[in-house]
Amino acid sequence: MAAHMTEAARAALGARLAERLPIRWRTRFAPAPTGYLHFGHAVNAVYVWSIARAFGGKVLLRIENHDRQRSRDAYERAILTDLTWLGLSWDSAGGSEAAPIRQSDRTTTYERQMDALALSDRVYACRCSRREISSHGMTDGELRYPGTCRESGVPFAETPARRLWLSDESIEFDDLNHGSLTQVPAEQCGDLLLRDRLGQWTYQYAVVVDDLELGTDLVIRGDDLLASTGRQILLSERLGRATPPLFLHHPLVLHPDGSKLSKSNGDTSLSELRENGWAPAEVLGHAACLGGLQPTSKAIGADELGDLWRPRA
Ligand code: GLU
């Protein structure tokens, strides 16, 4: 379980948000349709929508279905149903209709950015399998690509898999919650996989292109993605983004043994809560408490979420 933030810590985070966010800004809620939403997603949604409401930002909904094997239309439909039930509405990315953005509709964009990146000579084709890479062991719980295909000149026509050659630069960034951090992506994960052997865009690549092209100013997500942030900033620089988005990583809801919530672990989905008689405001209130944004599980409606950032007596 995440700990409650003290009033002082929450006020300080609110002050940093107010100071650093531009006048008009966008964030996004970006679930992968590989399972049903559960309390972990609800906590993230409460952070995203409460901050957007309190500090005047827009929320885009992005369905991260880059993994075609694990994504299901039924999960996507369930995500839309759950958000609508909770009263969390999203904004339009451009036109008049607030349609969700689907990564599977964005292939042309990913290809265009890949072509631009490939001009730099830092993109190479890779024929290594995950098993080969795993045989080199893990560093800090991550597989690190040892650079096997870097200079072997694998022809582009042989495989769709592409990696980005990383130099060992350190990336410094200032997370709104964690403060100043330094990461060296070349040491964490090695050359970044952009597209895999099945021709699927990877999470790291798609998320960076999307945040660049859709104008994300603030990324709000769980601490499990903190380690990915340096490499995403590095990639966004290579794609020509001068200023990376702001990042806020919040605590995850964990089981007492430290494992993450997931539907496959038997954790209750939001749709099951709905069937069991929970009201939307009860789910949001409990999620706000789990995320440390209020001391109790007091019910809170979607349109009151901004109040979580008001000073409390
Ligand atoms: N799709 C990712 C997830 O469901 C979130 C990606 C992100 O916020 O960068 O965990």
Image: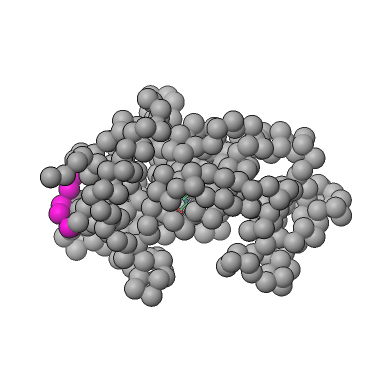
The residue at the point 23 percent across, 49 percent down is 7
Q: Quadrant of the N terminus?
A: bottom left
The residue at the point 27 percent across, 36 percent down is 54
Expressed as whole percent of the image width and height from the top left, the position of residue 291 reads 30, 55
* Total residue callouts: 0
Identify the coloring: one colour
Which is more toward the observer, 50 or 280? 50
Q: Tell me: 20 left or right of 69.
A: left
The residue at the point 31 percent across, 43 percent down is 12
> Can residue 55 be seen from the camera position used here?
yes
Which is more toward the observer, 311 or 31? 311
Which is more toward the observer, 271 or 181? 181
Q: Tell me: 227 left or right of 194.
A: left
The residue at the point 30 percent across, 49 percent down is 9
> Residue 287 sits in which quadrant?
bottom left
The residue stretch that appears in magenta:
296-302
Q: Is residue 165 shown in magenta?
A: no
> Can residue 30 be seen from the camera position used here?
no
Q: Tell me: 182 left or right of 10.
A: right
Q: Quadrant of the C terminus?
A: top left
Expressed as whole percent of the image width and height from the top left, the position of residue 299 reads 15, 52
Q: Which residue, as the protein is rendered here, is positioned at the far right?
A: 152
Expressed as whole percent of the image width and height from the top left, the position of residue 124 reads 78, 48
Q: Tell me: 154 left or right of 298.
A: right
Q: Main secondary structure of the magenta part?
A: loop
Tell me: residue 130, above or below residue 249: below
Q: Which residue, as the protein is rendered here, is positioned at the far bottom?
A: 257
> Residue 267 sits in which quadrant?
bottom left
Which is more toward the observer, 63 or 116? 116
Expressed as whole percent of the image width and height from the top left, the position of residue 59 reads 37, 36
